[in-house]
């Protein structure tokens, strides 16, 4: 099937109303504990997965073929395989953590906090379907920082039917805040601030705009041609703002042109990548970003994406240096499992 560019939407999720008094978690089975390793690695290094191997800077660990997505923690990688959360340490030891049933996970910008949704335990409806919970952990110690309180669903609830239409989504995490299920949750005390709706009807999380994520600040943008500027809404476009707030990346569509925009002037600048398209993957520091240069052939009948290469780039000059070999697209690949991933992403086109 030929891959075409699509607009990246901001998915708004509705809150699931829990009824009844909060009860002790022991009634529903003990929550899983997050494993950590003995050695830390450089979480600021470019990270990418290809054909079973996870590359983190100069280090590599084997994850195997059945990887849906991954994020880096302080002492290893947390990754999903068909709904099961796995952990591989810096030393390469892999263990199964829990069958959480979903691949919705996130990590803070400094990789000190990991969050996931979990449907392995907790309150159930009359059909024995568990309520989806969110859990956040310190990746350095494994300490659980937050878990959705155990609250019984309504007696008439059919959670499987509800989740098939409206699933509580994890929208991101920082070292202070968790954005989940229509609320901003403070990790320090578990307090919740419900989302509001802006003038365009888009869900707004308290503290979200001010939070630095692994890809930068999430922002709304507007503009056409060679000009982009910040907007108070994501209705016109979705962007990422560099950690120093100087540079805008327009991520409204894929394939994404290898360009950025100056935040002050709105002027376009070209990223000196191997090809004309580029997907941002993360930041090593305020002046160094990395991502995937992409060779696109709009006329190809099977897949417009023909090759990829991971590169690291200097924000000031936009000069890029390859850190991976060129990875050509395999048109014979069945697509059953991902062959290439960057941190936080799911299967690539």
Image (cartoon, rainbow, N blue to C red):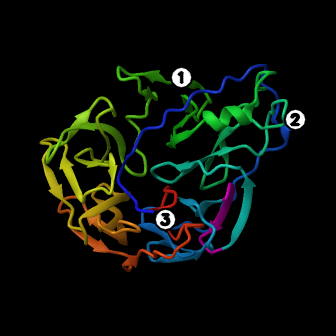
Is residue 309 visible in the rendered image? The answer is no
Image coords of residue 110 (percent x, y): 46, 52
- Indicate the quadrant where residue 223 lies: top left
Image coords of residue 189 (percent x, y): 61, 30
Q: How many labels does the image show?
A: 3
Residue at image mark 2: 27
- Indicate the quadrant where residue 305 lies: bottom left
Query: Magenta span has 84?
Result: yes
Q: In which quarter of the image is the N terminus?
A: bottom left
Q: Residues within 10 Å of mark 3 (few under 14, many from 20)?
A: many
Element marked by disc 2? helix
Q: Using the image as rendered, state which of residue 95 and residue 198 is in the foreground.
A: 198
- Indicate the quadrant where residue 241 lies: top left
- If you read the primary sequence from the N terminus, does the residue marked by circle 2 or circle 1 appear first? 2
Residue 194 — which label?
1
* Residue at 36% from the left image edge and 48% from the top image edge: 216
Range of the magenta residues?
82-92
Residue at image mark 3: 341
Answer with left or right where residue 281 lies relative to residue 140. left
């Amino acid at each position: 099937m030929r891959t075409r560019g699509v607009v990246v939407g901001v998915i708004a999720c509705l809150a699931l109303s829990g009824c009844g008094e909060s009860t002790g978690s022991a009634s529903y089975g003990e929550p899983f504990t997050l494993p950590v390793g003995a050695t830390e690695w450089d979480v600021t290094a470019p990270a990418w997965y290809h054909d079973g191997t996870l590359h983190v800077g100069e280090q590599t660990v084997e994850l195997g073929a059945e990887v849906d997505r991954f994020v880096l923690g302080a002492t290893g990688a947390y990754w999903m395989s068909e709904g099961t959360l796995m952990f591989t340490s810096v030393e390469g030891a892999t263990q199964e953590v829990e069958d959480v049933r979903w691949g919705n996970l996130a990590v803070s910008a400094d990789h000190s906090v990991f969050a996931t949704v979990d449907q392995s335990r907790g309150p159930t409806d009359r059909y024995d379907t568990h309520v989806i919970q969110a859990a956040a952990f310190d990746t350095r110690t494994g300490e659980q920082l937050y878990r959705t309180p155990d609250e019984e669903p309504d007696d008439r609830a059919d959670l499987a039917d509800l989740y098939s239409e409206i699933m509580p989504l994890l929208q991101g995490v920082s070292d202070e805040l968790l954005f989940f299920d229509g609320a901003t949750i403070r990790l320090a005390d578990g307090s919740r601030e419900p989302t509001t709706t802006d003038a365009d009807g888009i869900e707004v999380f308290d503290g979200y705009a001010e939070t630095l994520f692994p890809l930068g600040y999430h922002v709304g943008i507007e503009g056409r041609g060679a000009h982009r500027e910040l907007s108070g809404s994501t209705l016109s476009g979705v962007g990422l703002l560099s950690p120093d707030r100087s540079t805008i990346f327009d991520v409204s569509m894929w394939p994404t042109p290898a360009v950025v925009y100056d935040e002050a002037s709105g002027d376009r600048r070209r990223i000196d990548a191997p090809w004309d398209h580029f997907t941002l993957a993360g930041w090593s520091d305020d002046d160094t970003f990395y991502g995937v240069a992409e060779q696109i052939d709009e006329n190809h009948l099977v897949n417009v994406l023909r090759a990829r290469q991971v590169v690291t780039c200097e924000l000031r000059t936009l000069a890029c240096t390859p850190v991976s070999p060129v990875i050509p697209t395999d048109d014979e690949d069945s697509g059953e499992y991902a062959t290439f991933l960057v941190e936080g992403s799911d299967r690539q086109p």
